Image: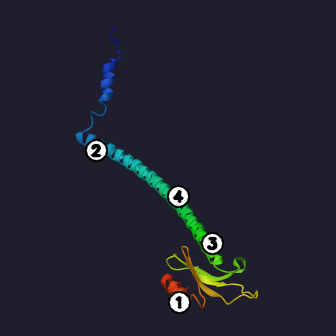
Amino acid sequence: MQPSRGRLPLVVVAAALACSGCGKSAEEREAERHRADAEWRAEAAVAESWRQKQEEQLVKQQLAEHQQREQVDDERERKVAEIQINADRARLIEQVRARVANPAAARFGNDHWNAARTALCGTVSIVNTSGVYSDYKGFVAAHDDVVIDSDETHARYASASAEADCAP
């Protein structure tokens, strides 16, 4: 097929379009390249900034979730420890009750753990044979050992109290 007369061949038109910038000086072409590079770097910087913000948000979210899980775990551990402390206290109180004549009538006061939480210290009032409550007497309960202050056990009570550091 021959090109029609009066019309420029398609190849010539394409070459003309391709060289439309050919009439520019080297400085103009270099300036255009610099502008295009600057635009690309600016777009890349915006994209990188957006990516960093997204990453920071994700890290903050993950950190918040981690802290929340830690708080839940800490609260669970605190509750378990509290349950254990209360169970230990109840066990030791029952051991003190077992050492008195009328366990159901025993009254307790000022019971507390020693600083190391190895002994329960406090006072107990028991009903005497006349049905009258005695003055409160000190006690120390640790593991399976219970000492209640009395005339007969005062030296042992004083030693156990000092050893357990039962100061309130």
Q: Position of residue 124 (x, y in %)?
A: 65, 84
Give the amino acid type for the residue marked by disc 2 in the picture.
Answer: Ala
Camera-side residue: 106 or 108?
106
Q: Residue at point 69% right, 84% down?
A: 126
Q: Residue 48 location in percent, x, y?
A: 39, 49
Mark 3 residue crowding within 10 angstroms, few (<14) / some (14–19) / many (20+): few
In whole angstroms, how far apart are the C-alphas of marks 4 and 1?
A: 51 Å
Residue 134 picture quarter: bottom right
Which quadrant, please, contains the C terminus? bottom right
Q: Residue furthest left?
A: 26
Determine the secondary structure under disc 4: helix
Residue 139 x/y as whole percent: 59, 83
Q: Which residue is mark 4?
A: 69
In this view, the residue farthest toward the top is 1
Question: Sequence-wise, which precedes: disc 3 or disc 1?
Answer: 3
Comparing 14 with 38, the one in front is 38
The correct choice, above or below, for 72 with respect to 155 in the image is above
Total marks shown come to 4
Can you tell which mark lies on residue 90? 3
> Badge 1 is on which residue?
155
Which numbered circle lies on residue 31? 2
